[in-house]
């Protein structure tokens, strides 16, 4: 019976091969783009700008409805809504609202581009996005990256990174990850666990290419079982092994990958907690996670957050941010469950 239920469990994950969504921002029921566009136009024209209305409207509509509002706005006001919002808003609120006027994929692609272009590389952003996005998401990101920037993501990543760090990121960008299979291959699980151990903890030095190929080509449910099995070979679990075996950006990348395979929403919850509680609150990280995940899995991130930190994400936001920035973040997180 256990085998059958496992088999059925695998099948449900698998329908269409797409991850289930847990959004906090869902379609507005009696949606009227003209009415919303009029409200935004009035809010922008108000002396001193009525930020609250802009926040209320745009955080309570998913991207496709925001796009309809922008279209209706342009017909009414004879000007571009994004340009008008840019002129009316500033600071962190402006950053969030402009982020919301991009689809999740466009937003990710722009964040990657921003981390690469200019002097120096913002490795933290590059690692977070490339190592936490699913294969499906990365396929879309590559397509949109090319449309937006007329450049190949692979070439840009290769031109900006080096060594094994570059090899790992490029392997992920090549999106060769297997789809989850309805059949659990215990032999393959054992082989992979053994190979990860033989390539790292067991030997002096680390055979990084073996780690890269296993972690960039196997399906996520398979890797979850591999990491379980790994513990019967290695005295350290996978995360501890990463810390012992590799350093720097490569270590950070493998850690994000492994944490996301094990529990992606817990990874984001921890990232948010760290970013908000650190000295000089890392606003950029908070903005990026909340904007990019509010239509994907932010609801689940909220429940992992509460389970792990004993206080809701909303409470932490209320304590560590202020003003319109706080309001817009809370608007995207929605009411506490």
Image (spheres, rainbow, N blue to C red):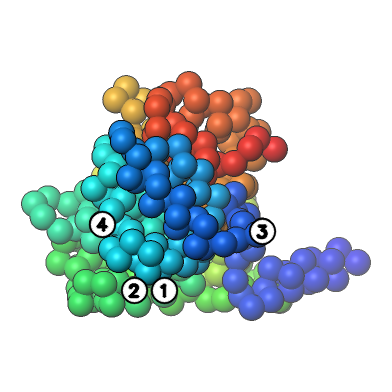
Q: Earlier in the sequence, mark 4 or mark 3?
A: 3
Q: Earlier in the sequence, mark 3 or mark 1?
A: 3
**Left/right of residue 245 with respect to residue 60 in the rendered view:** left
Q: Earlier in the sequence, mark 2 or mark 4?
A: 4
**Left/right of residue 140 with respect to residue 35 in the rendered view:** left
Secondary structure, mark 1, is helix
Secondary structure, mark 2, is helix
Can the viewer see residue 213?
Answer: no
Select label 2 or label 4 by which is in front.
Answer: 4
The residue carrying pointer 3 sits among few (fewer than 14), some (14 to 19) or many (20 or more) residues within 10 Å by Cα, namely few
Residue 89 or residue 101, whichever sits in front: 89
Residue pointed to by mark 1: 140
Secondary structure, mark 4, is helix
Q: Residue at x 48, y 21 (%)?
A: 319
- Per the rendering, the mark at residue 83 is 4
How far across and down, in percent of the image, does residue 323 sit? 40, 27
How far separated are the C-alphas under marks 2 and 4? 21 Å
- Per the rendering, the mark at residue 144 is 2
How far separated are the C-alphas under marks 3 and 1? 28 Å
- Per the rendering, the mark at residue 29 is 3
How far separated are the C-alphas under marks 4 and 3? 27 Å
Select label 1 or label 4 by which is in front.
Answer: 4
Say which quadrant the N terminus sits in: bottom right
Work out which residue is located at the far right of the displayed protein and give it.
Answer: 1
- Looking at the rendered structure, the number of numbered marks drawn on it comes to 4
């Amino acid at each position: 019976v256990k085998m059958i239920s496992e088999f059925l469990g695998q099948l449900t994950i698998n329908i269409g091969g797409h991850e289930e969504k847990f959004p906090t921002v869902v379609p507005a029921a009696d949606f009227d783009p003209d009415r919303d566009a009029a409200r935004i136009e009035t809010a922008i024209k108000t002396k001193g700008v009525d930020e609250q209305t802009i926040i209320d409207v745009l955080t309570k509509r998913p991207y496709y409805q925001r796009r309809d509002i922008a279209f209706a706005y342009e017909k009414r006001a004879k000007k571009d809504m994004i340009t008008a919002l840019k002129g009316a808003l500033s600071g962190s609120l402006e950053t969030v609202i402009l982020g919301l006027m991009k689809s999740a994929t466009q937003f990710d692609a722009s964040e990657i581009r921003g981390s690469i272009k200019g002097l120096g590389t913002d490795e933290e952003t590059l690692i977070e996005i490339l190592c936490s996005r699913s294969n499906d998401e990365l396929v879309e990101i590559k397509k949109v990256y090319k449309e937006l920037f007329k450049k190949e993501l692979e070439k840009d990543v290769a031109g900006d990174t080096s060594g094994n760090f570059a090899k790992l990121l490029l392997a992920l960008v090549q999106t060769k990850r297997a789809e989850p299979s309805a059949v659990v291959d215990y032999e393959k699980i054992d082989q992979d666990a053994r190979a990860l151990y033989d390539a790292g903890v067991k030997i002096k030095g680390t055979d990084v290419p073996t780690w890269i190929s296993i972690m960039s080509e196997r399906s996520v449910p398979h890797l979850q079982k591999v990491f379980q099995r790994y513990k019967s070979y290695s005295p350290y679990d996978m995360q501890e092994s990463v810390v012992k075996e590799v350093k720097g950006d490569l270590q950070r990348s493998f850690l994000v990958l492994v944490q996301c395979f094990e529990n992606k929403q817990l990874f984001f919850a921890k990232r948010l907690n760290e970013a908000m509680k650190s000295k000089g609150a890392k606003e950029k990280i908070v903005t990026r996670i909340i904007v990019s995940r509010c239509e994907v899995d932010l609801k689940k991130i909220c429940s992992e957050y509460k389970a792990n930190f004993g206080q809701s994400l909303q409470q932490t936001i209320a304590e560590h941010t202020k003003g319109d920035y706080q309001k817009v973040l809370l608007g995207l997180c929605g009411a506490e469950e």
